[in-house]
Amino acid sequence: MSVLPAAPPAASAERSSPTGEIALLLRRVGAMCLVELQKLRHDRTELVTRTVQPALWLVVFGTTFSRLHAIPTGGTPYLDFLAPGILAQSALFIAIFYGIQVIWERDAGVLAKLLVTPTPRVALVASKAFAAGIRALVQALVVVVIALLLGVGMTANPLKLLGAAVVVVLGSAFFCCLSITLAGVVLSRDRLMGIGQAITMPLFFASNALYPVDVMPGWLQVINHVNPLSYEVEALRGLLVGTPARLGLCFGVLVIAAAVMITVASALLPRLAR
Amino acid sequence: MNPVLVKDLHYAFGDHVAVDGVDLSLEPGEVFGLLGPNGAGKTTTLRVVTTLLPAPPDTVLVEGLDVVRSRRRVRRLLGYVPQQLSADGTLTGRENVALFARLFDVPRRGRAEAVDAVLDAMGLSESADRTASTYSGGMVRRLELAQALVSAPRVLVLDEPTVGLDPVARSGVWDRIHEVRRANGMTVLVTTHAMEEAELHCDRVALMHRGRLRAEGTPAELTAAIGPDATLENVFRHHTGDTLEAGGMRDVRAARRTARRVG
């Protein structure tokens, strides 16, 4: 028993300097992301089952539509055009159900336990956001492999691949926090499940994931312009298959959208713990 | 200094008054039991002490720190085990504890040793590398204690720690709590509706009923005042005219759900 320490670790981070606060935030996000990786290592079935849907989109939908030549992609083969869209979509589908995980954690007492640690709320939310990003990245890797097997010409430039990884993480962070925000509003798993299902498909179809913006009717183009998924897809397409993309704009939109959503979700998180 | 000091605490969820003027003052190193039937306001009181629910300034102090104004410093001093079995089943015992060591800034140097030590103290060394989903209820409880203890809290807060456990697992949990307390002098605040357990394991108890404290003292004092051979159960009935078994799990859940909707 004597080996157990008798006092809490010195709270060096308690000096509330901005750098100390940021260091604390980064440490916390790191700790939570590590746990997320450990969970993935212990339960790989989820990784496999989540691969089925993007694989179907690419193999069945993608190859069939390639034969139709119905979608004007500006000279890019349709599968090449589609692969970044499916990548973004699979990341969206992972992230949008994170709110359900948070509600489950609330019901299981996990959330209360985490909130009673010296961890800023924003760090808890940011951790979830980056955890969603990590899961999405693992998923993205699978999609990239399938795409390569189907003969999609993807970049091998490590900088561009890194850029694409950042885009996936930012997009996932946004949709994860959107989901946590909705969780903080509806407070029930069933309702959130319904809302999640109700918004994912519209987000997907009102984006440039399956077809270029130009072929959309005007009203859909308007929605497309405020849909972060479109900016995610545009950036991924530009980075991975080299189609023209407004990379600066896309990164800007994704960074701001993720930051705003993390802030909003953090403000609503305590509602869940009451 | 009192490890936990509560001064005339009131808390309401909408129209439902959960806590109606509670005063508590804990002594360093004691095991203090908050006793009462489901819905008495014990958990709400704990949630204010643990900074999960807001309180007016200077109403609740932990080690002299206000739970509202010094929220994060208070959290560093607390170890908290909620009522539900809340360890992560997809992680190993060791990973579960290591997470909390990181969240409490246990220094990297010596962190692994601290995790090992607390797992050993909770009797989980052998199973530390199995995922928690393979643990029995008693083991999960001890794992959660390990999570709460790895940061060497000054005040350990336990919400119904032995609910749903068999007698052997129960005494296993209590034995570990007493061992750690003897070793490091921490204070323990525990809620329970199991009177025999409180009689056995708490230094002092407060009986809570409908948001108010009805009696307070050592189990021996309280029972002696009622008569020879009296139990805490008798004491409770004497002070409240009510029995402890009033209201089942379903009532609490319903009450909580209501509380959540309003709150």
Image: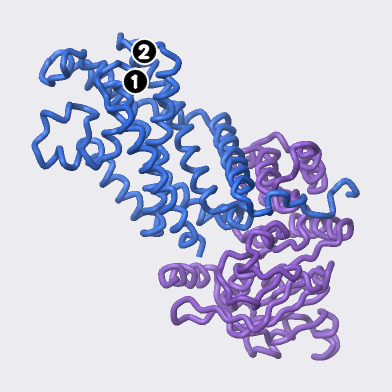
Q: Position of residue A146 (x, y in %)?
A: 36, 16
Return the residue nearer the eye: A70 or A164: A164
Disc 1 packing (10 Å; few <14; some 14–19; many ≥20): many
- Amino acid residing under circle 2: Thr
Mark 2 secondary-structure assignment: loop
Asked whether residue A186 appears in the rendered view, the answer is yes
Residue B56 figure quarter: bottom right
Q: Position of residue B237 (x, y in %)?
A: 68, 87
Q: Position of residue B55 (x, y in %)?
A: 58, 74
Specify how the rendered protein is coloured.
by chain
Label 1, on which residue? Answer: A239
Numbered mark located on residue B128 in the image = none
Q: CA distance from mark 2 to mark 1?
A: 7 Å
Q: Chain of mark 2?
A: A
Name which residue lies at 76% across and 39% down.
B111
Return the residue nearer the eye: B209 or A147: A147
Residue A28 figure quarter: top right
**Picture colour for chain B:** purple
Looking at the image, is mark 2 or mark 1 earlier in the sequence? 2
Label 2, on which residue? Answer: A155
Name which residue lies at 37% across and 36% down.
A171
Residue A7 lies left or right of residue A226; in this view the side is right
Mark 1 secondary-structure assignment: helix
Q: Are marks 2 and 1 in contact (CB under 8 Å)?
A: yes
Q: Position of residue B45 (x, y in %)?
A: 62, 73
Name which residue lies at 61% across and 69% down.
B68
Name which residue lies at 37% across and 21% down.
A143
- Amino acid residing under circle 1: Leu
**Picture colour for chain A:** blue
Residue B165 lies left or right of residue A142; in this view the side is right
Say if A253 sits above or below B11 in the image.
above
Return the residue nearer the eye: A217 or A180: A217
